[in-house]
Image (tube, rainbow, N blue to C red):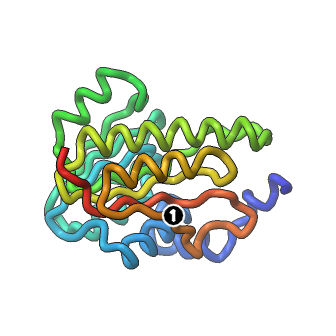
Amino acid sequence: MSVNSYEKPDFWSKKAFSEGYPARSVYKLKEINEKYSLFTKGSCVLDLGAAPGSWTVFILRTLAGSGKVVSVDLKPLAKNVTGTNLVFLQGDLYDEDVQARLKSEGPYDVLVCDAAPPTTGNRLIDTSRSVDLAETAVYYAQAMLKKGGHCAVKIFQGGDQQAVLAKMKTLFSSARSFKPAACRSESFETYLIGLGKKAD
């Protein structure tokens, strides 16, 4: 896969910029939410790995001033990503202080995670790091979602995806994988969807 294939804007990228979203990834969440109804007005949503902020913007627009979005990333959000019901925390998901702060803003109705590790080109390393991130997101879901809550977590295919999905099946009434149409054809990412968090 050439680097240029990611640099050249495709249909989804152009559509995202024209609609005021920082990145094309918004359409993955849009499709996931249309299919699984993760969040609606009034939802309290935790967005892990949020930068540059397309998912956060889409959630804010869906909530239309209701509910709350709590977003976190190592990098800052794009400057135009703002909202009176947005809380942004710049920090590391693995940091205990960050975890404590995020927990204090919850509990949440929904958790979404579009975080991806810096890719090396070595698929074994990349998928392993992606599994670590997905497992961390599932830990957050277990600790911070309300009963009945939902989650959507990105993971690279080819790693220990089935083990993460098996863990989610113990936490949620149903769990499955789903690859939105807006994923690039050459991409090996998919999403794990957990619906209806069981009681602790």
Tell me what residue is drawn at x 79 percent, y 42 percent.
Answer: 121
Image check: 76 left or right of 185? left
- Residue at x 45%, y 44% (from the top left corner): 49
| x then y, percent, for residue 58 | 36, 65
Relative placement, left or right, of 48 versus 144 is right
Residue 43 position, x and y percent, is: 19, 61
Examine the rendering and report whether any part of residue 84 can be seen: no
Q: Tell me the quadrant of the picture where the N terminus can be found.
A: bottom right
Residue type for callout 1? Ser
Q: In this view, does 32 lie to the left or right of 132?
A: left
Residue of label 1: 177
Q: In this view, does 137 lie above or below 99?
A: below
Name the residue: 22% across, 70% down: 40
Q: Give how far across and how far down residue 147 sits, in percent.
A: 17, 53
Quadrant of the image for the C terminus? top left
The answer to which quarter of the image holds residue 141 is top left
Question: Which residue is at the front of the view, 16 or 143?
Answer: 143
Q: Which structural element holds mark 1?
A: strand
> Front-most of 54 and 156?
156
Residue 98: horizontal and vertical position, in percent? 31, 27
What residue is rendered at 55% in x and 75% in y?
15
In this view of the protein, which residue sits in the foreground, 132 or 20? Answer: 132
Q: Nearer the viewer, residue 86 or 29?
A: 29
Question: Is residue 112 left or right of 158 when viewed as pictured?
Answer: left
Count the labels in the image.
1
Q: Going by the picture, which residue comes out furthest to the top?
A: 96
